[in-house]
């Protein structure tokens, strides 16, 4: 198997988890990776050239399955992947955001028309029912399948969660227009006297009741902020899945986020920690407050068993893909 990751910064952890899961399923993995301009400082043109060269090199591996973890050119990637396809096996393109949270090339009308005309291969892969529904709206669901988001097994699963005097509630990652600012503002007013509310990431405005650190987070610091939080929030009005939610579960910290199928797969027995984003503002805020209180009080053993079940579910899904590719 060959794994191609064009986002060596943003998707390093995702790719680590993917490689771990498919390796455990018995696949021998060759990994190709480059770093995106936002992390490397290089031009987008150079990044595209590196991506094409990486696809050309991956084609020579003669792998029974090639997985590309991100579409550099949106749906236009399907043209590139067909051009550089490995004739020894299938190619799968992971589409994390079929309707991107930020403007992205290749996801508009022209990209969708081109994708529908490319043919049945390469295949598309998404991590939730909502993403599959989006592909259906684009006329592409017939070439797509759903698999769980890869989840890594905790190295120190018996470690107890931090127990600060005042619980620490953190939001991590950059600001986007789909962030639920109404909820965050309300939480600042309602809960800042009892909880330490923190936001770490680029582009965030000041929010009363919250301590905001507007800066880039290196990988190691990101993990430490997740690990030492009492609760991690994923405050979106619209999202398909969250790598931060997965990371929190892996590191032994409960997350709270929108009720989408990818999150329900992680929390099959903890529905109270997921929030319906279609509720009106008052009901939505109340649901977030209730979920935070539940998460703070969540027993460690429940969280450990939840994480272990998520690992097993992801492993089962990806093992099926590995076995299918060998058939």
Image (tube, rainbow, N blue to C red):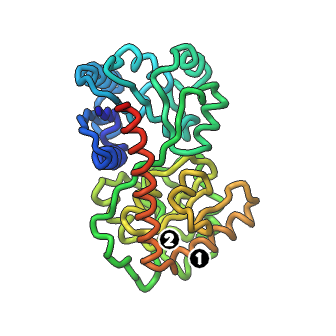
- The residue lying toward the viewer, choosing from 294 and 266, is 266
Kindly identify which residue carries mark 2. 197
Q: Is residue 12 visible?
A: no
Instruction: Locate residue 305: give its quadrant.
Output: bottom left
Q: Residue at x 36, y 68 (%)?
A: 227
Density class for disc 2 (Cα within 10 Å; few <14, some 14-19, many ≥20) is many
Q: Earlier in the sequence, mark 2 or mark 1?
A: 1
**Quadrant of the snapshot with the C terminus:** top left
Q: Which residue carries the number 1 mark?
A: 191
Extreme front residue here? Answer: 327
Is residue 8 at least partly visible in the picture?
A: yes
Residue 172 spot, x, y in % from top left: 44, 58
Name the residue nearer the viewer: 160 or 198. Answer: 160
**Dot 2 and dot 1 residues touching (CB under 8 Å):** yes
Per the rendering, the mark at residue 313 is none
5 lies above or below 253? above
When the figure is inspected, residue 140 is found, relative to residue 160, above or below; the finding is above
Secondary structure under tag 1 reads helix
**Within 10 angstroms of label 1, few (less than 14), some, or many (20 or more) residues?**
some
Does residue 14 sit above or below 222 in this rendering? above
In the rendered image, which quarter contains the N terminus? top left
Secondary structure beneath dot 2 equals strand
Is residue 10 shown above or below 232? above
Q: Position of residue 65 (x, y in %)?
A: 34, 30
**Residue 40 coordinates in the image, percent (x, y):** 28, 37
Q: Is residue 121 left or right of residue 135?
A: left
In the image, taking residue 97 as reference, residue 228 lies left or right, namely: left
x 50%, y 71%: residue: 197
Residue at 59% over, 37% down: 132
């Amino acid at each position: 198997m060959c794994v191609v990751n064009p986002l060596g910064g943003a998707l390093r952890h995702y790719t680590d988890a993917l490689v771990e899961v498919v390796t455990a399923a018995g696949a021998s993995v060759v990994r190709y990776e480059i770093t995106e301009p936002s992390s490397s400082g290089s031009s987008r043109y150079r990044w595209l050239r590196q991506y094409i060269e990486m696809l050309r090199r991956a084609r020579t591996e003669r792998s029974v399955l090639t997985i590309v973890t991100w579409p550099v050119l949106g749906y236009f990637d399907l043209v590139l992947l067909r051009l550089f396809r490995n004739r020894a096996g299938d190619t799968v393109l992971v589409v994390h955001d079929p309707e991107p949270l930020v403007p992205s090339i290749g996801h508009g009308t022209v990209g969708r028309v081109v994708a529908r005309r490319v043919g049945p291969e390469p295949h598309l892969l998404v991590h939730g029912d909502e993403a599959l529904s989006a592909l259906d709206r684009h006329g592409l669901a017939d070439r797509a399948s759903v698999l769980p988001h890869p989840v890594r097994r905790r190295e120190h699963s018996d470690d107890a969660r931090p127990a600060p005097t005042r619980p620490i509630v953190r939001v991590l990652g950059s600001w986007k227009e789909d962030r639920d600012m109404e909820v965050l503002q309300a939480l600042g007013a309602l809960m800042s006297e009892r909880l330490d509310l923190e936001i770490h990431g680029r582009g965030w405005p000041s929010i009363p009741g919250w301590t905001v650190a507007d800066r880039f987070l290196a990988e190691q610091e990101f993990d430490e902020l997740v690990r030492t939080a009492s609760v991690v929030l994923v405050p979106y009005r619209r999202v398909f899945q969250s790598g931060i939610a997965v990371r929190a579960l892996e590191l032994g910290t409960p997350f709270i986020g929108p009720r989408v199928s990818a999150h329900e797969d992680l929390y099959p027995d903890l529905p109270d920690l997921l929030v319906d984003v279609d509720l009106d503002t008052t009901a939505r805020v109340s649901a977030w407050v209730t979920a935070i209180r539940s998460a703070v009080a969540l027993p460690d053993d429940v969280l450990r068993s939840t994480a272990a079940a998520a690992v097993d579910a992801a492993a089962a899904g990806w093992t099926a893909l590995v076995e299918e590719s060998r058939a």
